[in-house]
Image (spheres, rainbow, N blue to C red):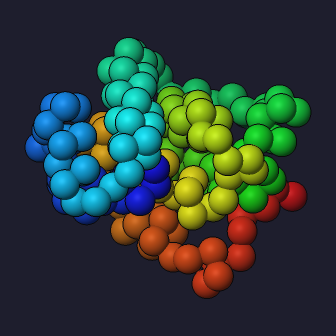
Amino acid sequence: MFDILVYLYETYYRPDACPEPQALAKKLSAVGFDEDEISEAIDWLDILTQTTLTIPEQPESTGFRVYATQEIAMLGIPAVGFIHFLESAKLLTSQQREIVIERALAVDDTPITLDKLKIIVLMMLWSQGKEPDLLMFDELLLSDEVIKPHLLH
């Protein structure tokens, strides 16, 4: 699924340039992606789009996010630390953080790797029609092997 998400990010600069789900499925199949992965990616993106559209604009929260034990187990400490880093650096709003967490928890990969979490962050921004700023772009594109995970202290 993540290969498809990266392909979409690289191929369609904006989400409104992306074709409708049926046409997209045909294009992805023609490129050589597996039907099950295509279906999973399209469903995942559809829920991302719906989540992005249904969350009303609210004043930025100044509260602190407390993760449930199950969330930490599913996300993993490195992912929680990276999300916290992005938010504390003001690269993610609290609303964007919640979208990222919800979409990360929907992935059948626990704990989620930092590379996959970075793709989720990119796709969340893509779905909102926003580009990551330079600092975030560097953080999202650097490999886990190049940087150490941002752990909570």
119 displayed left or right of 106:
left
Q: Is residue 29 above or below residue 70?
A: below
Q: Give left or right: position of 110 versus 101.
A: right
Residue at 24% across, 50% down: 28
- Give how far across and how far down residue 141 sits, in percent: 45, 71
Residue found 33% across the figure and 55% down from its top: 33
Residue sitting at the far bottom: 146
Q: Position of residue 85 (x, y in %)?
A: 64, 56
Query: Vertical placement of 149 versus 105: above or below?
Result: below
Viewed as shown, does residue 140 lie left or right of 14?
A: right
Residue 89 visible to an observer of this rendering: no
In the picture shown, does residue 136 fall above or below 17? below
Residue under the image location 48 percent in, 65 percent down: 140
Q: Nearer the viewer, residue 18 or 61?
A: 18
Q: Position of residue 113 (x, y in %)?
A: 66, 59
Q: Can I make out residue 72 in this image? A: yes
Most foreground residue, 14 or 11: 11
Q: Nearer the viewer, residue 123 or 83?
A: 123
Residue under the point 46% across and 54% down: 2
Image vertical order of residue 12 relative to residue 16, above or below: below
